[in-house]
Amino acid sequence: MSAELQTVNAEIISSLVINGDLSKLNPTQKVQVYNNLCERLGLDPLTQPFSLMTMQGKQVLYCNRSGATQLSNLHKVSHKVISRENLDGILVVTARAFTPDGRETESIGAVSIAGLKGNDLANAYMKAETKSKRRATLDLLGLGMTDETEIETINGAQTSNLDSLNEKFKPKQIEQPKPIVQEAEVIQPERIEVTPAVENQLPTNILKKLQTVGTKVYGKEWDSKRKQLVLSVTNNRTDSSKLLTPEEANKLIKGIEAKLPTVTDNDLAEVKDSLSMMTSEENITSWWNTLPPDLQRNKAITALVIARKKELK
């Protein structure tokens, strides 16, 4: 246990262990718990695989899309939809998660489809499948925590990411000294000459790769996200990617690449299965717009979409 957590009293430790409640920890301690969990599961904390949920005075970690994708890839988890049932307006999808060593488990994902039609109905089908697969993955790996797809059904739940409490991601603002007024005479502060930093000669190919990977994962948000990630990987030394050392740049690239979902044969089969349920090009277009940009650029998925549209003509 870290020195930060050793200073926490017994009541808070009990709440943390029994209920997973982080609400009584300070921001530094929360980040320490978060980092310890990522290290134990073999996940990269820079990709923020977990987020925070606040509900009824408690604050707990839940697994988001990035975390579920990394866990599935790390443990080579495959999925298969076992059944779909409509129970009085509730769509219940049962999915099986299994690993190469023979371990497997099943879990359900349920969403309300009462009164839905068209795009809304198609999205509900896909949401139920996603929910069942992610819950099966977490159950299979022994993680008794809430999945991102379950949050919206919890009344009063509020979510946030680690940026909201980790000050290391935020550059500190330095207040400018104010003039000292004495007997109506304004005394100007002493001018401090700042020597500009000399940029490292980071190889162009590394900078280009960082830009490419960052844009692929974060899209239009990359410019603002880059400064936060650079501050984190350099321990607040700089927020400029040009001042990264080759080691820091490669570490950052590796962390961002971990967020890229790996499209397996099993994934493609699931996409094909989802497309087969869509009865119009409008349904397909709506579903396509919900995909992350990196999946939209996947040639295999694009080919399946084009083929399905041709079938509907």
Image: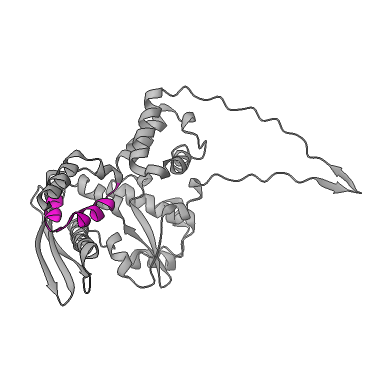
Residue 217 occupies quadrant: top left
* Helix, strand or loop for the magenta stretch, by majority: helix
Furthest residue toward bottom: 88
Would residue 76 be visible to someone looking at this image? no
Tally of marks = 0
Asked if residue 264 lies left or right of residue 221, the reply is left
Question: What residue do we see at 33% from left, 44% from top?
Answer: 44
Horizontal and vertical percent position of residue 75: 19, 47
Foreground residue among 23 and 256: 256
Furthest residue toward front: 313
Q: Which stretch did the figure color magenta?
A: 270-292
Would residue 206 be visible to someone looking at this image? yes
Q: Is residue 236 magenta?
A: no
Question: What residue do we see at 20% from left, 61% from top?
Answer: 122
Horizontal and vertical percent position of residue 185: 89, 45
Question: What residue do we see at 14% from left, 53% from top?
Answer: 275
**On screen, 83 above or below 1?**
below
Residue 223 occupies quadrant: top left
